[in-house]
Image: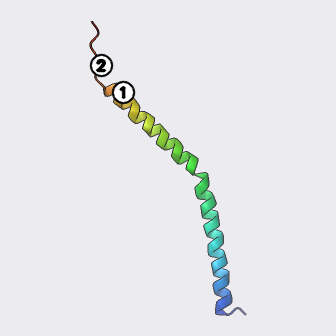
């Protein structure tokens, strides 16, 4: 039968495994975040260009 120390060590190992899995999953989502930020930045630049006053052509 497990004593409290062995149970705590087992639970710590489970927490570490979950943290590693979460860290790996979070790393795979970073390119999507970068792609979304780049996309919204391009939209913002486009809107600023569209709203910029144009010089009158004679």
Residue lying farthest to the top in this orientation:
58
Say few, some or many: other residues with alpha carbon within 10 Å of mark 2 (under 14 / 14 to 19 / 20 or more).
few
Q: Position of residue 4 (x, y in %)?
A: 64, 92
- Residue that appears at 57% across and 51% down: 29
Image quadrant of residue 18? bottom right
Residue in the image at 60% along x and 55% along y: 27
Question: Which label sits on residue 49?
Answer: 1
Q: Residues within 10 Å of mark 1 (few under 14, many from 20)?
A: few
Q: Name the one closer to the observer, 45 or 6.
A: 45
The residue at the point 64 percent across, 66 percent down is 20
Residue 31, x across and y down, in percent? 57, 46
Q: Which residue is mark 2?
A: 54
51 displayed left or right of 10: left
Task: Determine whether 13 is above or below 50 in the image.
Answer: below
Report the side of 31 relative to 50 (left or right).
Answer: right
Q: Quadrant of the N terminus?
A: bottom right
């Amino acid at each position: 039968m497990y004593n409290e120390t062995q149970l705590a060590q087992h639970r710590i190992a489970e927490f570490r495994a979950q943290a590693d899995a979460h860290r790996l999953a979070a790393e795979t989502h970073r390119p999507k975040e970068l792609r979304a930020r780049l996309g919204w930045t391009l939209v913002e630049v486009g809107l600023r260009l569209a709203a910029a006053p144009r010089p009158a052509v004679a």
